Image (cartoon, helix red, strand yellow):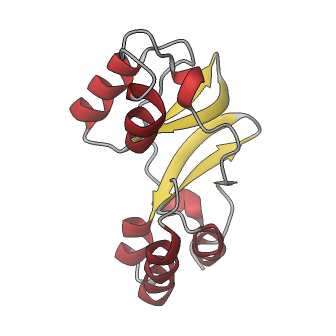
Amino acid sequence: MSKVKDVMTTNLTSCKSSDDLATLSRMMRDDDVGFVPIVDGEEFVGVVTDRDIVVNGLAKGSSGEIMASDVMTEKVITGYPEMEIEEAARLMQEHQIRRLLIVENTSIKGVITLGDIGWHGIDEAAAGIVREVSKGEGNN
C-alpha cells in the first residue's frame, strides 16, 4: 500500500497570520490555488481558502485591512506523511474535504488532494469523496 508521503504535493505556498487578504489573494492567483496554509514561524496555525476571503473577509471591509488571522480556519483536519493513502481518502470522505494537509508535529509537510488519490489508482476512494463532498460542500 502506498503512503501519503509518496504522492503528496510538497511545494506549498504559505502565508503568515499577519498577511492581509490582498497578499493572500495575489498568492492564490499567482500559484493557481484555492487555499493557503497559514504558518507563524515554522508552526502551522490554520488555512485560508478563496471562499474564506470572499465570504468572511471582503464582506467585512477592505482587503488591506483584514488579516489572515481574521478569516482563517484554525481547526483543520490533517493527516501525516506515513498515513496510508486509503486512510487519507477515508478521512477526506468522512469530513467532506477535497484536500488534506499533511502535518508532522506542527510543521506542514505537504497536501494530498482528491486528484492525487484518483491519479494514483484509488478511483473508488476518490469517487466516494466526490459523493460526500457534493452532499455538503466542505470548506477545504
Classify 14 as above or below 93: above
Nearest to the observer: residue 47 or residue 121: 47
Residue appearing at x 67%, y 54% in the figure: 77
Of 50 and 33, which appears nearest the observer? 50
- Residue 105 is situated, as x and y percent measured from the top left of the image, at 77, 38
Q: Residue at x 40, y 18 (%)?
A: 61
Q: Is 87 drawn above or below residue 121 in the view shown?
A: above
| Residue shown at the point (32%, 43%) measured from the top left | 33
Residue 115 in the image: state x and y as whole percent.
36, 68
Please state the horizontal and vertical placement of residue 136, each as a whole percent of the image: 52, 70
Q: In which quarter of the image is the N terminus?
A: bottom right
Residue closer to the observer: 28 or 57: 57
Instruction: Provide residue 132's location: percent of width, then percent of height.
Output: 52, 78
Please give the name of the residue rendered at 45% of the width and 23% of the height, measured from the top-left corner: 60
Snapshot quadrant of residue 74: top right
Image side of residue 23 versus residue 90, left or right: left
